[in-house]
Amino acid sequence: MTVIRPLIAVVDDDESVRESLPDLLTVSGFAVHAFSSAEAFLASDCIDQTQCLILDIAMPGMTGPELQRELTRRRQQIPTIFITAHEDETIRARALAQGAVGCLFKPFSETALLDAINAALRVS
Amino acid sequence: MKRSEAFLAEAQRLSSTGSFSWRVATDEITWSEQLYRIFELDPVVPVTLERIGTRLHPEDIPSFDEMLTKQRRDGSDFAHEHRLLMADHSVKYLHVVAHAAHDHDGGLEYIGAVQDVTQRRLSEEALGKARSELAHVARVTSLGALTASIAHEVNQPLSGIITNASTCLRMLAADPPNVDGARETARRTIRDGNRASDVITRLRALFAKKDATTESVDLNEVTREVIALSLSELQRSRVIVRPELADDLPPVTGDRVQLQQVILNLFLNASDAMSEVDDRPRQLLIRTERDDGERVRLTVQDVGVGIEAQGLDRLFEAFYTTKSSGMGIGLSVSRSIIESHHGRLWAAPNDGPGATFSFSIPRGLDDVTADLAGADSVEAMPTLAVNDASQVVRHP
């Protein structure tokens, strides 16, 4: 019997995040796709299968919150965990108010990340 | 005749300028009364080169001797600067200009004037120091504006470090351990650590308080460093940075940190000017290029609220600001920095929305070290001097 690994999408313009986060998620038992922009994610064909979206807030072009609103508009909501290197409580409050499952400030621990992902997967 | 002589003496006293003649063949020297006063020598004893030598600043004696030798040989007009060390250990700065003539016997004779420029030199020195302190204040002020950006720049690699290290531990704990994978993630951890350390190094350089230094500077490199430091702050303000850096840009001679400060200030101004713009992309164009006449130009163009043509000059006045949070010293400090690099900084409204700020500075000498070694302490000082603003050519 094949265990289907939940698919997580990582959208971040920072290359070192796209490099490190998927590896950690893979060794933690998830399937991962990484995208360098919101636009690239929207153009991909894995929106439907994505069970959790790890989304950077500040990106050139479409921002993380804008992508989340666009998905809501398309009725393709995905449980979302925002990540940001700006430690700003108002950002977190706004993200959670808009329906995000979590909002992690970089650098975040493995435990905080996996807790947030488990919460997201329970939602989906 | 007497009257006009009296007028002349008074004029010399008022302008701290004395006159002299020097017959080269006999070393016969005549001085005006004022020149005796400047040297603080008794006019009863006729002046000789030996007597002048007793007043010369020891450090300036070699260059003074060299000047005498040259002028004996060349017989051409000359200008020379040197210092005097007075009996009370005070220092005077003198500026000498002389015209080569011939006496009635056809011998070479110099007729010249000596001005005591001590006051001017001292104020230039004080001005240079004040400006350097002001530039430091402005840097620290922008540090406040950049705190969020700095935290972002450091948190980004820290995030990579923690994630990679977590992955590394998991790979080692697997059965069997994934040693190759662990090695790769450990390598990335080191790389991200170096990245964080680079950010700190750049910051330290930018905010350290130090006197102006002169070195060969690649303006493209400086621009890239400032972009790297401010990028996340600019992105957070939804500013799209478009660098257009010329490939064949010659280096300039100057103070790297001061130039970074100017560019950073222009970036932050451009970003502020676009903070209310919502109907068009907040585009910030930064361009470097060769300018006419061996100069290098840097341009920062925004699409923000723009500037009034009639308010252009006031922009560069100290403490003039249109921003509620600004101190109004950024542009005035920036302009004096650029002027100390023998360049100019100006602003112009765009044809479309926004404004363009540009500076243009002479390209550096290819051999900077030779240039520095050739400048003695007196000649080195004018690099700190702020030009009279009225001499600055302003763009229409």
Image (cartoon, helix red, strand yellow):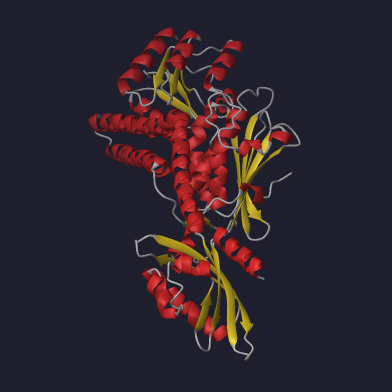
B177 vs B258, left or right, is left
Image point 46% across, 56% down: which residue?
A: B214
Q: Residue B313, how many percent across, how many down?
A: 67, 39
Considering every residue shown, the one lying at the far front of the view is B2
Q: Horizontal placement of B113 versus B356: left or right?
A: left
**Residue at the spot 68% in from the left edge and 26% down from the top edge:** B280
> Which quarter of the figure has residue B190?
top left
> From the image, which quarter does the C terminus of chain A lie in?
top left
- Does A58 sit above or below residue B267? above
Residue at 53% of width from left, 45% of height from top? Answer: B223
Confirm whether residue B62 shows in the render: no
Depth check: give the residue in front, A50 or B284.
Answer: B284
Q: Foreground residue, B16 or A60?
A: B16
The x and y percentages for residue B227 are: 52, 40
* Residue B133 versus residue B239 in the image, above or below: below
User: Which quadrant does the N terminus of chain A fall into?
Assistant: top left
State the residue in front, A66 or B283: B283
